Image (cartoon, rainbow, N blue to C red):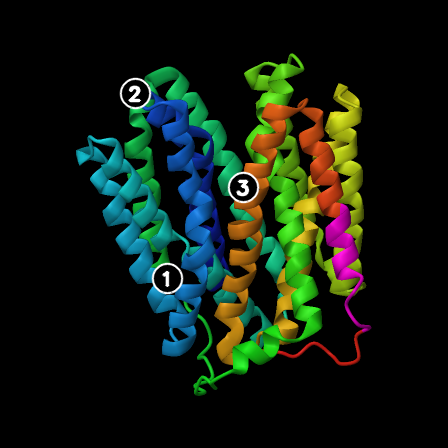
Amino acid sequence: MTPVLRWAFGAFFFLYFAYVGLVSPYASLFFLDRGFSAIEIAVLMSMLQITRIVGPFSWGWLSDYLSNRIGIIRVCACLAAGVFVLIFFLQSYISFFIWMFVLHTILSSQMPLGETATIHALYKDNSFDKRYGRLRLWGSVGFITMVLIAGELFQRKGIELYPYVGVIVLCALALITFCLHEPKMERRKMVKGELITVLLNPDVRWFLLSGFFMIFAHASLYVFYSLYLANLGYDKFEIGLFWALGVAAEVLFFYYQNKLLSRLDAEVILQGAFGIGVIRFILIAFAPVTSALILAQVLHAATFAAHHSAATKLLQRWFTGPLQARGQAIMATVSYGLGGTIGGLCAGWIWDLSQPRDVFVMSALACGLAGMAIQKMRPRRYPTRKS
């Protein structure tokens, strides 16, 4: 992968996650400013996860069928920018509901296909372990940059600037996709039943189940951690610092991940990430003091970054050739779609019926279940296949 192409993929990750850093913390505030109730806002925000249940696999199937991932990424990025512009003309709640669903169904294509194109290009020149983390970390940088800049902007100028920031970010994302390229894909007919054969592999099913439980565990973090910290007496600036610390730890892991991925099998890294996840959520639940919470945020390097990189590498063992995009999409659907949605619902139910710490006890148990699932995988008897 040439330096120019690495720059393009890095910029792609930066801009996509800059959008995530805009919508995740601030869309709910924009909807509140429009006069919607808490339950109406909750339904609108749920579109971020619900559209990941079906969307990624549909886009993955289409890209494998057409053997043209980059083309679909470009079309969807341009469509998303166009759909976002409609925010200036929306008035009713139902119009915002339809808008959120359509917009994030389109955007659900970007990460599975973008990840697959990046991995394909890196595997072609045998540089996945060395380069992937250093490209992917730009997503983390984009997220934290947007959270901090948009937060300051909205504090000074008002949340009504939210639509303008969204248009700028998505238009920039659409433009950068025209700089993306990947090595020519092997043109091979899709074999009927080929995907089912892979999914019938017990190792694949245990792996996907572990991903489900890991993102299930993290749903409580994404939904309730800020509120949990506020209940403990931390102010908004301090809460922002906790989140920034977690993302900084994530960036450091991505930058230096080659030292770990080149020495340990992906399964071993996953087992470690799940074990550290148990420790992290136990600390949050039962040791809510500043020093322990700081340590818990540093452990985000393992529970998110190490888990993501190892899972991405492991997917290449089973989902190769015309199955690559669908493999990434299935992982996104099972983990972030189903796991994130169900985990968030369970966390909300526990938060209402019990004390806040029990939400994170649930997360620790889910990490334990993820570890049990990955331990069910058979010992590896064959080398990782290259795409």
Residue 320 point in image, percent of width and height: 57, 77
Task: Residue under label 3, please give it.
Answer: 141
Rendered residue at 68%/63% (across/down) = 207
Label 2–label 3 contact, CB within 8 A: no
- Residue at the left extreme of this rendering: 89
Q: Could you tell me the amino acid type at mark 3?
A: Val
Tell me, yes or no, if residue 265 can be seen here.
yes
Name the side, left or right, on which 87 lies relative to 59. Answer: left
Rendered residue at 66%/24% (across/down) = 354
- Distance from disc 1 to disc 2, alpha carbons, whole Å, reads 34 Å
Within-10-Å neighbours for mark 1: few <14, some 14–19, many 20+: many
Label 3–label 1 contact, CB within 8 A: no
Q: Could you tell me the amino acid type at mark 1?
A: Ile
Helix, strand or loop at mark 3: helix
Which mark is in front, 2 or 3? 2
Rendered residue at 49%/35% (across/down) = 145
The verdict on residue 159 being magenta is no
Task: Residue under label 2, please give it.
Answer: 35
Task: Residue under label 1, please give it.
Answer: 73
Closer to us: 361 or 99: 361
Q: Is residue 294 above or below residue 334?
A: above
Closer to us: 6 or 102: 102
- Distance from disc 2 to disc 3, alpha carbons, whole Å, reads 32 Å
Q: Is residue 211 above or below residue 353?
A: below
Point out the tag, 2 or 3, that comes first from the N-terminus.
Answer: 2
Quarter holding residue 240: top right
Residue 258 point in image, percent of width and height: 71, 59
Quarter holding residue 124: bottom right
